Image: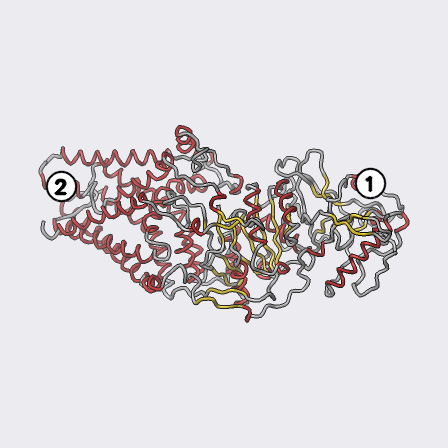
Amino acid sequence: MKRIADSIYDQLEAEWEEAHPDAVLQETEIPATALAEVDEEEPTQRFVSQTIVPTRSHPWNAVAWRPGLSGIHEAGEDESESPIRGSRRLSEKIDPFRKVSTVSTLESPISGSDDSPTASKEEADIITNLQSPDQLPIIYPSGRRRSSIAGTTSWDAPQSIHYRVWTRSAAGSISGASLQLSEVEVDSLNGDKVRIPRAVAAITTFQSQPQTPRSAVNIVAKHDDYDRLPAWRRRLFRLAPLTTLLAMGSYFAYFAYRIFATVQAQEAFHRTYVAAWVFIASEFLVSIPAFFHNTYSLLSVKGRKRAKLRLIGTDLPAVDVFITCCKEDPDIILDTARAACAQDYPSSRYRVVVCDDGADPILRQGVEALSLSHPNLYYHARIKVKGKPHHFKAGNLIAATEMVEQLPGGAGEFIAALDADMIPTPDWLRCVIAHMVDEPRMGLVCPPQLFYNIPDNDPLVQSLDAFVHLMEPTKDANGVAWCTGSGYAIRKSALEDIGGWPVGSLAEDVFTSSLLLGKGWKTAFVHEGLQYAQLLSMGPVVKDMTFLQRLSGFVFPAGALFSICLMITLLTIPIVLLSGGTLVAFADSAQLRWQIRLAFISLAFNRLDNFVAHLPSGYRLSQRDAAAHIWMTPYHTMTVLRSFLLPKWLGGKPMAFSSSGSIKSELSERDAANRAPLWRRCVVMIWQCECWMHVLLVLFTLTAVIWSCTQSMYAVRPSRNYTLIYLLTHAFWPPVLWIINLSAYLTPLLYMLAPPNMPDREELLDRNAETNVARPKESAKRQRWLKWALWPELQWTLCSVYTTIIFVGTFFY
């Protein structure tokens, strides 16, 4: 029977060789390696990858690895002298009746040179444990690794063949790609039906990787966001630097006059206005991050020029697509995998690897089933060795990169990555790779992360529109586009130039793009909707960064630290009101009038700048993003204090990290059918989500305003004019920002009381009945705004009208 199977194998191999004349089957050797240490305390892992431990000699007498087949052939005693199958070149003549064999004797580097042909009991036990055909050999990489990750390969180690075996505790992890496990039925020479493992010839190979010419890049439009930003908006947006400059100038003019008037008042009345100076100091602190951001945006006055590109033809670069996941819903991951496999890109030129850091057996089975219809789909889960750092997502990417290097044809010219829930559009690869082909020094290209399940009115401002449509285009205009974690493509040679995936930061995406810029590579932000979903010392490695790139690396991270300044400002207003001190000092009525007039001018130019600067994302975002920044400030402040300033005995602790897929909702608050009751939502959000901070801020602000208004009625010199001036210079100083702050504090509390309703995920997707590929509906991609969306604008309108009335009044009173 074995002889018949051999002849059938030879026939299939000959047919494969005729279909792939350029392919060469390489001989692979099995080294002497030790058993891998198993992390038996890791509950999410179900398998362990172990290597064969050879005997003192004849290590090949145990099994023979067949290149090109996803199965294992056990060699007989009479087969030890023939050369290994598959080690010849395809031009050699194939003898269909010769015996299958193992390689010649190979001395074990760890066991001496004893020539005993008997396999050790340890080796025999391991081989015996290979109980089913799906325990496939996995080839791991040889030579030095460009990025170190414990538990995947060894430094300067030769290649080794790994097998999946069950452990007693069912712990450990799967290592290597899970190849196709199905068998095919063929006719033997004597007419019997024989089932043999399916050959891996159909699996995508990058054996031939020709250089894609730049002529394959087609310019679809002059601007990549032409369909999002109409011509009139684009022309008006050119005025953004001017409106920003006017807003900054008017604010600092108002701020400088406030200082002048306070000094004059102190000289005139021989008293110190402590409350006024505290208010001025808090305004100065909160203006610092705004000043840096506005200055940075002014440096992009030349504008952003990036064309909409697409690759044409089929002679395209080879790409390895990684879908990184960890404990997310398998159905969500499989939808992403289906969409990735259904790209408008030659299937022979890209591979899709599901990189499962949670070692989910259900996901593995789903991927293997899906790979029957998509031969370029792979599953991979790395070993996590006990006591060794795993490096989170960076470690997952490192292990996947090492794995694809050992697939037929090696790694592709580019690596693309998707998050577990990011469904790419069909033209995703043709877009991001086009920018790589068009610019040889382009190291990384990244599109925005967009969403198809944003609730009506987006109460928590989760759309990331400010980041996607304002910040990233501005950074791209300055040559500082960041990798935002999903949908990006990176040039393999550029990744090698920076030493591989960096493991020194939880934000490996931003870290990677910063290292690329530091090495002189270019990065790009593609302002197109291509995907939709549900610091170490760096001086030596950023030497090639431009001034704008270095400034960007300071401005945006520093914003988190300056959240403490905003928190101080938010607390200063009610504290000053409760103290009864003067918020605005003046020596005479003329100074009071001019302070009011400058406050009006500053507000007017700021409203104008908000409108013009937010044209790419929509005007609504200008108010909503500011409110979100306010109600998130307590969280940012607590994080900074706990992580950097407070000692452990006062609650200080390092920042923790949890993969997004491992965070499960306790409330299901957006599911009308399964929503937790109100009391449960209040307990979880107020205590566990720390919304008690917002409750205290609401009560503190209301108490301060009521107290201040009461004091104006019981003043020492009660009169109509004095009462109005007291109210004007205290609780109702234009533009009455405590109203804006109070509304922002209420945002998470209103969400707790009345969360939005979201339909089931399947209702937001169009699923192809034949291929089962799901993509977001066009209606789900668009943001819906209902009547409650007018509330933020109504607040600002009332504040603006009030300030205008007071401004006009300064010319009559």
Please identify, in this view, whether the residue under mark 2 or under mark 1 is nearer the observer.
1
Which comes sooner in the sequence, label 2 or label 1? 1
Mark 1 residue type: Ala
Specify whether 515 is left or right of 743: right
> Residue at the location (41% across, 48% down)?
463
Q: Residues within 10 Å of mark 1 (few under 14, many from 20)?
A: some
> Residue at the location (50% across, 43% down)?
762
Tell me the quarter of the picture where residue 232 sits: bottom left
- Give how far across and how far down residue 375 sits, in percent: 66, 53
- Give how far across and how far down residue 334 sits, in percent: 58, 46
Tell me the quarter of the picture where residue 736 sits: top left
Q: Is residue 752 visible?
A: yes
- Give how far across and how far down residue 406 sits, in percent: 69, 55
| Colour theme | secondary structure
> On the image, numbered disc 1 is attached to which residue?
124
38 w.r.t. 547: above or below = above
Q: Report helix, strand or loop for mark 1.
A: helix
Q: Report helix, strand or loop for mark 2.
A: helix
Mark 2 residue type: Leu
Front in this rendered view, residue 617 or 81: 617
Q: Is residue 112 visible?
A: no
> On the image, numbered disc 2 is attached to which residue?
724
Specify whether 15 is left or right of 799: right
Q: Are marks 2 and 1 in contact (CB under 8 Å)?
A: no
